[in-house]
Amino acid sequence: GAGVSQTPSNKVTEKGKYVELRCDPISGHTALYWYRQSLGQGPEFLIYFQGTGAADDSGLPNDRFFAVRPEGSVSTLKIQRTERGDSAVYLCASSPRQGAPFGQFFGPGTRLTVL
Amino acid sequence: GIQVEQSPPDLILQEGANSTLRCNFSDSVNNLQWFHQNPWGQLINLFYIPSGTKQNGRLSATTVATERYSLLYISSSQTTDSGVYFCAGMEYGNKLVFGAGTILRVKS
């Protein structure tokens, strides 16, 4: 079956611009997670959705970052006024439900480069 | 927050050799996953293993929850095993906290 998909795979933008990153979770998965991975480090948690609502957004670095999941499936991570420090790989993961005994399954990521 | 520590930080193996990677985690971790990140960046889910032992082909994992550690065993390593191995602890059913990873290089 299809795994988690993310688009675009690569995004190059200029400092100060707005970007949107999209995640399509595995069909039927109710839990969706966003992580960010900088070069040479492990992924770091950003935000978690259970259904349509953000259950935990404690990892968002500041108010330039926002994510939505309006219909409980596809999610969009939005970054306003991008900065060079936002450059990283943004990873999306899904799980059948919160705390499901299957773990989280990751997409291929979107590599964001802010010039 | 929860703490996840991995060792060794990097490892070079000759093809065919066996290896053991270790993950220590803090008290508040209640679930554990092992991942392999291949050279293209894809994170592959290897094991979901809060306790006990699981095996999948040449890979196996053991978590001793009472002693707060997990081990990943790779037997008869192949060049395709190269990449970064992460363990990640889950706190109360939501976010994963990743260790720094073990960089594995298997030479032919």
Image (cartoon, rainbow, N blue to C red):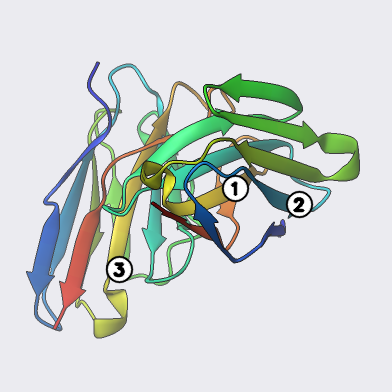
Residue beneath label 1, please? B87
Q: Nearer the viewer, residue B53 or A48?
A: B53
Mark 1 is on which residue type? Cys
Instruction: Give how far apart the Cα atoms at labels 2 and 3 are.
Output: 26 Å
Callout 2: chain: B
State which quarter of the image contains the N terminus of chain B.
Answer: bottom right
Q: How many marks?
A: 3
**Could you say which disc has been placed on residue A10 in the image?**
none
Q: Is residue A33 left or right of residue A76?
A: right
**Circle 2: element type:** strand
Q: Residue at x 36, y 43 (%)?
A: B80
As drawn, A107 above or below B41: above
Callout 3: chain: A
Mark 2 is on which residue type? Phe
Callout 1: chain: B
Q: Position of residue A53 (x, y in %)?
A: 40, 37
Q: Position of residue A16 (x, y in %)?
A: 14, 82
Instruction: Name which quarter of the figure residue A95 lies in.
Output: top left
**Circle 1: element type:** strand
The answer to whether marks 1 and 2 mark residues whose Cβ atoms lie closer than 8 Å is yes
Residue beneath label 3, please? A88
Task: Decide: few, some or many residues near mark 3? Use Cα within 10 Å; few <14, some 14-19, many ≥20.
Answer: some
Mark 3 is on which residue type? Ala
Instruction: Give how far apart the Cα atoms at labels 1 and 2 are.
Output: 9 Å
Residue beneath label 2, please? B25
Q: Position of residue A99 (x, y in %)?
A: 59, 28
Q: Residue at x 76, y 34 (%)?
A: B63
Instruction: Give how far apart the Cα atoms at labels 1 and 3 are.
Output: 20 Å
As drawn, B99 above or below A34: below
